[in-house]
Amino acid sequence: MITCKNALIVAGLMMAALLGSSHAAPKTTVAELRDLKVIGHHFTTTISTNQRTIYVKEPGKARYVVLKISAYLQGGSGKLFTDDFVLRYVHSDGKEDRSRCSAITWAETEKLGEFDKFYAGEGSWVRFDPGRVYLGLAFYIEHDVEFVEICRIGVAESLTYRLGAYDRPYSVFVSTNRGAEMLKKIEDTIRNGGYAVQSTQVLNPDESGTTIHHRDDTETQAREISQRLMTQLGIVPTLKKMNLISEVDLVVWVGKSVGTH
């Protein structure tokens, strides 16, 4: 005979089982990624997000590398965490090392330099829908590292990628509302100075003048770029300490009313 007390116990056990089933650990989303490919990368000293700013203390020894990755996500939608990714590499002296992912984001397209805002720190995550996805991953990396293996926690296979030893150009993002011809001239002028340049024609149509937004540790580079623009294009920029959400070293806005000599 099942007494009232026993019935309550049985019901409780059944409820616990149901709750346990509904809260069962889902598949690890990172393990569902297929066809991983690195589209490109750039280096930066600082990454600014809505919540925090992370930066390297000695840019002469290390930077953050920001990787843009294309992949196919199987199954349903899910989260990808900074904790899901790690770089494995070997220094020039043969010593093996690791670097955890410092920040993560997503992108709508494969275009280099096109990212949503980053989320930085342990436990940070971004939700993805199934299908083709584009993500950005940032890692602290020293200058003597030429090749890295991009590893996913709990997944045996890795992806090898070449960074290039000692080649760590400062990154610049250029936006303009003055059209493709002006954008190309500015891109070429800055790139010829040894900078890694990404660009877009998306800039507030009311923006005027040219502004170079720089980090605390990239003011020297901002002045050098300013000099190049003045000398070669007759553009007179204004330098401004960066107060933007960004994953690059310098941001250049070229508005419709550009000053000249």
Image (cartoon, rainbow, N blue to C red):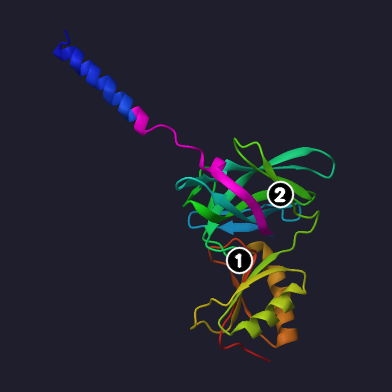
Farthest residue, direction bottom: 261
Magenta stretch: residue 75 in it?
no
| Residue at the image point whose x is 51% and y is 42% from the top | 29
Check residue 238 in the rendering and tell me which mark sits there, or answer none: none
Q: Which residues are magenta?
A: 20-41
Residue 118 in view of the camera: no
Question: In the image, which is nearer the foreground, mark 1 or mark 2?
Answer: 1
Q: Is residue 149 left or right of residue 77?
A: right
Name the element at disc 2: strand
Q: Which residue is mark 2?
A: 141
Count neighbours of disc 2 (C-alpha within 10 A) and say few if under 14, some if 14 to 19, many if 20 or more. many
Q: Is residue 238 left or right of residue 223?
A: left
| Residue at the image point whose x is 27% and y is 25% from the top | 15
Judge whether 179 appears above or below 122 on screen: below
Q: Which residue is mark 1?
A: 111
Amino acid carrying label 2: it is Ile
Coordinates of residue 39 in the picture (x, y in percent): 66, 59
Count neighbours of disc 1 (C-alpha within 10 A) and say few if under 14, some if 14 to 19, many if 20 or more. some
Judge whether 3 appears above or below 178 on screen: above
Farthest residue, direction top: 1
Coordinates of residue 23 in the picture (x, y in percent): 37, 33
Magenta stretch: residue 28 in it?
yes
| Residue at the image point whose x is 68% and y is 72% from the top | 222
Q: Quadrant of residue 20?
A: top left
Amino acid carrying label 1: it is Lys
In this view of the protein, which residue sits in the foreground, 131 or 247?
Answer: 131
